[in-house]
Image (spheres, helix red, strand yellow):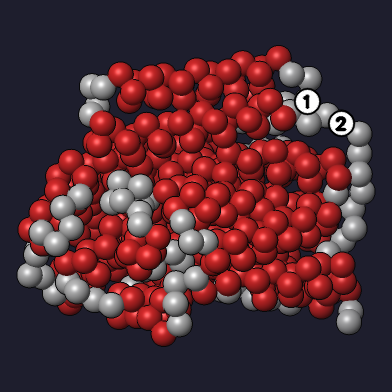
Amino acid sequence: MSSTSKRWWGLGLIALAQFMVIMDTSIIGVALPRMQADLGFSPENLSWVFNAYVVAFGGLLLLGGRLSDLFGARRMFAAGWLILLIGSAIAGLADSVAVELTARAVQGAGAALIAPSALTLLMMLFGTEPKELTRALALYGAAAPAGGTAGVFLGGVITEYISWPWVFYINIPVAVLALVATPALMPAGGMRRGSLDVLGALTVTVGLGAAVYGIVRAPEVGWASGQTWLVLAGAVVALVAFVAIQAVRREPLMRLSIFRAPNLAAANVAQLLLGAAWIPMWFFLNLYLQQVLGYSAFPSGAALLPMTILIMIGMILLAPRAIARFGPKPMVVTGLAILAVGLGWLALIRPDGSFTVDVLPASLVAALGMSLAFIPSLGTAISSARPEEGGLASGIVNTSYQVGSALGLAAMTAVASSAGADRLGDLPALTDGYSAAFVGAGFIAAAGAVTAGLTLRAAKRQPASDAEPLRVG
């Protein structure tokens, strides 16, 4: 195998890694009703099948990046796949809520090692060739939303024709393949001296977990209850402690001064709000299809296939050309605004609705907005940092998206429950609850569009040649 061919095969493995770690956030969506029935999840706690993964993933991403810097990206890449394999096996075998959520957290920890080391390996493979690096980063970026949307369809196929544990078991052969291929395709890299900010990783993970838990539990115990405010206050204290720790440590997980880079903070806010709007959309859209329209798992996943196809077209063809013509800032603003319109349209769902009227057109509008906003906000966040801090910038933007996803879903779960989504079998109440969640997510997307418009700086347009379709090799 030539060195050029080997690099592109290596990129394939890196893109597969990004695809899988994001797919694991969405593949469980269609399986949730079956899991709820088999394991005994309450409506309020069901979102923790998603959140347990995302909290561990988002909270440990910065630590994963640091471990990659210290012990070598290839070692951490392989270690992440091994941990993901173990967590997936336990999640599929789980027979209780506690075991399932623990396994999902283990999966998230493995993903937190894979994601930052994958980008570091990409930079090692392509960093000396600017033109190839641009193509490699574009394909890497497209793998994330592709994995998220493809997971919905794949989850429907598996749940309908096999059984829900296989949404976790599917990771096992992929992980084995990755472990076998990593030594041959990935550059070895080296180790360097340094310290681990374990306390920083602990405080940010505890703070995020407490915030999500407090918001999810609030509808059940009451927003005015002492328990709710105590948990949320604890979350604030932990996150403030994290910032304080980062400010005084010589080798922090996240150097705070990196946010002085133009556009980095603004692009991360855009990614956070994008995740907070997008993830609740597919979560509640799955529930509407199954629990209100009466779709079984496979038709439910198939119903979202048009959205998946549009996402792929938007990422690969539309977004690069639009960015080259108009610049990244207008596309982030426009994409978030279109997503808000799609969510507002979805809020019009009816108890006796239909896929062609209530779901298809609105979901396609939302998917178009997502595809236009994701790539430019991700690229802006990474390119805003100094080249030697690309790994840190990637860890931060991945964390922003995952934090936004977790908190957005937690908040919209609370909104939906308070509006009637906790009354299973009552179709009008369920519809009102899901509609309220779409309205809330739409406001988040609209806020993201306004914020991006006010805070992102306009960038120089790319040369027209950059808008050509991406080619590998």
The single residue placed furthest to the bottom in the displayed view is: 161
SS state under label 1: loop
Q: Residue at image x 17%, y 71%?
A: 293
The N terminus is located in which quarter?
Answer: bottom right
Q: Amino acid at mark 1?
A: Glu
Number of numbered discs visible in the structure rendering? 2
Proximity of marks 1 and 2: CB atoms separated by less than 8 Å: yes
Relative to 303, residue 30 above or below: above
Q: Residue at image x 28%, y 77%?
A: 296
Q: Residue at image x 30%, y 46%?
A: 44
What's the mark number on residue 194?
2
Residue 61: give x, y in percent of width and height. 64, 43
User: Would you name the residue on which mark 1 appears?
Assistant: 251
The C terminus is located in which quarter?
Answer: bottom right
Residue 81: give x, y in percent of width and height. 71, 61
Along the viewing direction, whichever of 183 and 34 lies nearer the viewer: 34
Residue 204: give x, y in percent of width and height. 57, 30
Kindly report the distance in space between the C-alpha atoms of the residues bearing marks 1 and 2: 7 Å
Residue 290: give x, y in percent of width and height. 25, 70
